[in-house]
Image (tube, rainbow, N blue to C red):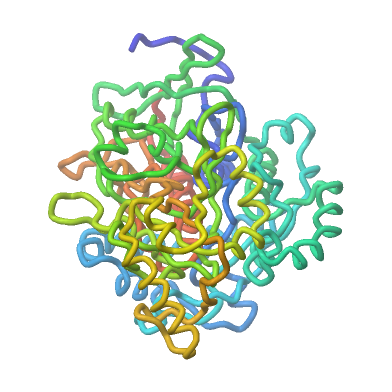
């Protein structure tokens, strides 16, 4: 691409591509160490998928746990990560898993030191308590409520908003379920919700973005929205010297003296990439439509090797529409007590409450196709009576809900065996009646027995893909031969993430996102501190 000479504000120590948790954290870290930083956001709103998230963060060996008297260490975190990783990743990603375990705690401490964000510990334990290094408490944190007015009005208007205001903390959602619990409980939370709506208090991912953005602005970062990065400039040695972008219909060059960080999210809105790496039935993604894999393609043109392209964060979701396009609303409705998930044979194939449900949904056969899809969520009328949000958004999703007076009729309507589905539900109900664990060890149940019976399609909803450019322990992008592309970093779900589809706890998307942004920002600062030759001049 033709070089466009710029000067003044078009030159920075570090240019960051993306304004989600990884991008904002990279910017905050670098700026806190004195670097001039520019954040380029393709969308006209700031926050990426993070702004729509639950805000749960897995951060082992953090300062909050230490203050509470909980013993933890980076060494124990690394042991746990290695013990629970898929076998191939435990070998190939050992160093990167160790880098995450070592830096997660310091990253969280930096946020509290440099932003108005304050975190609280959650009572959640690690998902694999029998594994070496596991902890029953102290590694899960979430932001406390934060008011939008900590930002100036102009920045508030640029925040990406969820379809519903995130008025509760992750703790409230986890403990009391004010959004999808019984209507009586939802009404109890109504005064609290109204108060927060009026005061501008926000929780979960919204609070995280508000606080990180405030910290970045206070540290001197510049933010440009509506700026789509189209390529990188490299010198004769392959070193990245600038980010090339389009803004307001014209090309712009931003010199990057000490690096460019790709933190642009996943590729779940690129149909060709998704079809290649996630064949089989898929529901609409539950992330911003701007997550089209721009960073991945830019890195490849710069010489990057790709990996982990079949890894992703899956979730249950409610279908919706945003700006005239299908747009799913990520929501954990599959934890309902009176529901099961069945495969095309009408049989259950997993514990519906398993935190790693995505692994089961994406389980593939020798032909590379999912073995248990298309799947169906089977429940009864009580589920809809309790879930006002699901019913509200379903109004615009014609055909999403299938009802029938009995299970055999329901099976026929969704193309399942009318003899098998009733038997599956009967086995589930009998285990509940005898207070026994079911076939998959699930305890929390209610009988599925109140007509009309209900079926919802339950295929893979991509919250974020987790494949992309391969990186080293400093978040530097690598070529296929293992050499470093000087001046190019990648963080968050844009990278070949060492924590992929398999979760070791809740929060193993945001935790790594923040940590790898921190690692990238620190390494760029190290380069400047040690007097590395600046590029992009």
Q: How many labels does the image show?
A: 0
Q: In this view, does 465 lie above or below 4?
A: below
Residue at 67 percent across and 36 percent down: it is 159
Q: Nearer the viewer, residue 321 or 303?
A: 321
Please give left or right for residue 162 compared with residue 414 in the image.
Answer: right
Q: Position of residue 357 (x, y in %)?
A: 39, 63
Question: For the C terminus, which image quadrant?
Answer: top left
Residue at 27 percent across and 26 percent down: it is 301
Q: Which of 447 and 470 is in front in this view?
A: 447
Q: Which of 120 and 397 is in front in this view?
A: 397
Q: Is residue 315 above or below residue 8?
A: below
> Which residue is farthest left?
366
Q: Is residue 286 above or below residue 196?
A: above
Instruction: Answer with the quarter of the image where residue 69 lies.
Output: bottom right
Can the viewer see residue 245 in this picture? yes
Please give left or right for residue 374 compared with residue 479 in the image.
Answer: right
Residue at 14 percent across and 50 percent down: it is 367
Q: Position of residue 293 (x, y in %)?
A: 38, 33
């Amino acid at each position: 691409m033709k070089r466009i000479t710029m000067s003044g504000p078009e030159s920075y120590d570090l240019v960051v591509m993306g304004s989600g948790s990884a991008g904002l954290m990279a910017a905050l870290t670098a700026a806190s160490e004195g670097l001039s930083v520019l954040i380029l956001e393709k969308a006209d709103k700031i926050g990426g998928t993070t702004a729509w998230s639950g805000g749960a963060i897995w951060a082992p060996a953090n300062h909050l746990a230490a203050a509470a008297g909980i013993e933890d260490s980076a060494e124990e975190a690394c042991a746990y990560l290695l013990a629970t990783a898929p076998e191939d990743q435990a070998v190939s990603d050992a160093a990167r898993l160790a880098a995450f375990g070592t830096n997660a705690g310091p990253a969280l401490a930096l946020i509290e030191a440099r932003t108005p964000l304050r975190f609280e510990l959650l009572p959640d334990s690690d998902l694999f308590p029998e594994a070496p290094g596991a902890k029953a408490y102290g590694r899960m944190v979430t932001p406390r409520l934060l008011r939008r007015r900590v930002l100036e009005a102009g920045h508030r208007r640029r925040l990406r908003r969820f379809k519903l205001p995130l008025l509760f903390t992750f703790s409230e959602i986890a403990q009391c379920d004010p959004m999808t619990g019984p209507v009586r409980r939802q009404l109890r939370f109504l005064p609290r919700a109204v108060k927060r709506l009026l005061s501008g208090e926000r929780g979960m991912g919204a609070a995280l973005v508000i606080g990180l953005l405030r910290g970045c602005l206070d540290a001197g970062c510049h933010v440009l929205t509506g700026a789509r990065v189209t390529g990188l400039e490299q010198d004769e040695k392959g070193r990245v010297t600038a980010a090339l972008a389009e803004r307001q219909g014209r090309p712009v060059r931003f010199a990057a003296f000490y690096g460019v960080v790709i933190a642009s999210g996943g590729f779940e809105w690129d149909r060709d990439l998704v079809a290649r790496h996630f064949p089989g039935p898929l529901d609409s993604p539950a992330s911003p439509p701007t997550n089209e894999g721009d960073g991945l393609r830019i890195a490849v043109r710069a010489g990057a090797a790709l990996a982990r392209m079949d890894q992703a964060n899956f979730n249950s979701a409610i279908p919706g529409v945003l700006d005239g396009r299908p747009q799913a609303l990520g929501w954990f409705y599959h934890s309902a007590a009176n529901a099961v998930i069945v495969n095309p044979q009408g049989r259950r194939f997993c514990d519906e409450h398993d935190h790693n449900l995505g692994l089961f949904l994406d389980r593939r056969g020798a032909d590379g196709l999912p073995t248990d899809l298309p799947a169906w969520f089977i429940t009864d009328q009580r589920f809809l009576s309790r879930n006002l949000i699901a019913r509200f958004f379903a109004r615009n999703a014609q055909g999403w809900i299938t009802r029938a007076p009995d299970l055999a009729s329901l099976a026929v309507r969704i193309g399942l065996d009318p003899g098998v589905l009733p038997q599956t539900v009967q086995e589930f109900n009998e285990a509940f009646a005898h207070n026994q664990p079911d076939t998959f060890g699930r305890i929390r149940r209610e009988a599925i027995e109140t007509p009309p019976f209900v079926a919802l399609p339950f295929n893979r909803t991509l919250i974020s893909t987790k494949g992309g450019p391969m990186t080293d322990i400093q978040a530097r992008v690598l070529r296929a031969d293992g050499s470093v592309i000087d001046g190019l970093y990648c963080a968050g779900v844009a990278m070949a993430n060492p924590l992929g589809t398999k979760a070791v706890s809740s929060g193993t998307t945001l935790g790594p996102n923040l940590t790898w942004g921190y690692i990238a920002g620190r390494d760029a600062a190290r380069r400047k501190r040690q007097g590395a030759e600046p590029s992009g001049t």
